[in-house]
Structures are given as structure tokens and as C-alpha cells.
Amino acid sequence: MSRAELRDALIASLVIAAMATMVVSIFSLIGQESGEWALIDSLSIGLQAGIFTFVVVLFLTLLRLRHISANPTHKEDKEETRQFLIGLGQNVMMSTPEGLSHSWTPENKIQIIRGVITLNLIGLRPEIAVSMVQSLVDNRPRLGRLRLVIGREDSWESEISTPNIRPAVLQRLRIDAERAQWQIIQSKSSVVLRPTGTPPTKGKVLLRLTLYGPIMVPSMFFAFRDLAGAEAEVAGGAFGILMGILLTALMASHRDRTG
């Protein structure tokens, strides 16, 4: 576990703890009768909630970081993956006569941009671009999140005067993306292949429910009950319980999208 990871864990825990302190203090102040010590009591309650939140979030974050560092399969070496993709692209280009005479070079077209491995397929013929996508699907176990630059729908490839590769690439992805466990996120000129993630095991779901449920449900109950006021505290408390259960279920079913 690096110093940067520890620093990030501390910062995230402090931010969440500060938010918890503010929210609990406000709700506590709303629920109390006005008095000389109401503000001080509310701040005291909020500070206790913030300290508790800080400890819990920091513990869970450090636990997660330790798990990731102990399992190298969850840590993607993007430069190593880029080199692998360059070799993959060279093999695709060498597999056809058109590719051998093509000016598209994997070394220049496969880059790491803002932490995401990006393949610029613009300039390829549609059949070669489809072969490239097929190679990505066939080597899915080696790959994580990818971004493919495929051009705008209404544009043309000026380099070689061929139709836009976008329809051909998207058609191939729609056929193979689900099998490869990739989610397709389209934009005007590119498509992101996001891993659909591994669903948690039943044991992990039960562990998360045990950890998050006793914290989330009572917190939401008291928060919405006090926010609703004396006239609607029953409805507010019931709504808080439902929201707590919903949030706990979402957190318990979170998928690991690192691979």
C-alpha cells in the first residue's frame, strides 16, 4: 500500500466525515427545541457522528486497499496492457494484404489518455477495424476498461476516403460485448468499453449487509424522522427506513469493475 493510497484514503474519510458531521448537526438542531445549549448539543452530536463515520470509512477503505494490493489481478498495469495491445494490433495489420500496406501504426494510435487506454481506429478500413475489435474480444481476460475512437456518425475518413467505421465497429460490439462482459458507453466520436463487473458472492453480500445495515438504516430513520417534524414523524421515520434498506441493498450488491 503506497503513501499516495494512504493519503487518498485519509482525505476521502475526512471529507465523508465532515459531511456526516454537518448533516447530523443540522438534523439534530432541527429536532431539538430552541434553547441556549441547543446549538452546542447539536454540534456535539454531529462531531461524534463524524468521528464514528471517519473511523468506519477509513477502516473499510484501508481494508479494500489491502485486498487490492494483495491481489495483483485487480491492479492493471496500463503500460503493459498498452504494449500487449500494440503487439495485438501489429498482428491484425500483418494478417491481411491491406493491413501490410496501411499507414495506421499501433504505436501511435494506442495511447493512455487520462488514465484510460485509448485505441484510435480512425483511418482503418471497416473490415480491419472489425478484425481489431474481434481481437480485443478474443483477448478479453487480459483487458479492462478501453476507449475506442471511431469517428462521428456523419463524418468520413479523409485519410483513405472510406465510409465511417463507426457502424461496422458498433455492430460487432453489439454482438460480442455481452459475451465479453463489456458495457458499451457511446459518445459522439468514441465508445467506452466498461467491464460489467463481477457480482459479489452470497457471503460477501451478507457481510456487507451486516456491516452497512446497522449503520445506514437507523441513521436514515432518525434523520428523516427529525426532518419531518412532530406532525409527520411516523411517515418520515418509515421513509427513512425504506431509504436505508435501499441504500444498504445497493451497497451490498456493488460489483467489482476492476477487471
Image: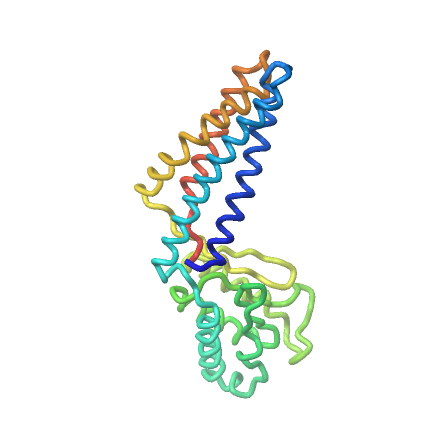
Query: 15 or 156, which is in the foreground?
Result: 15
Residue 213 percent coordinates (x, y) = 41, 32
Name the quadrant containing residue 32.
top right
Decide: is 73 above or below 8: below
Is residue 179 shown left or right of residue 230? Answer: left
Residue 95 percent coordinates (x, y) = 45, 82
Is residue 203 shown left or right of residue 5? Answer: left
Residue at horizontal 49 percent and vertical 58 percent from the top: 4
Quadrant holding the C terminus: bottom left
Return the residue found at the far top.
231
Decide: is 257 above or below 18: below
Residue 157 percent coordinates (x, y) = 66, 74
Residue at horizontal 59 percent and vertical 66 percent from the top: 166
Name the quadrant containing residue 72.
bottom left
Residue at horizontal 41 percent and vertical 41 percent from the top: 253
How is colour applied across the structure in the image? Answer: rainbow
Query: 7 or 169, which is in the foreground?
Result: 7
Quadrant holding the N terminus: bottom left
Image label count: 0
Name the quadrant containing residue 39.
top right
Residue at horizontal 65 percent and vertical 60 percent from the top: 188
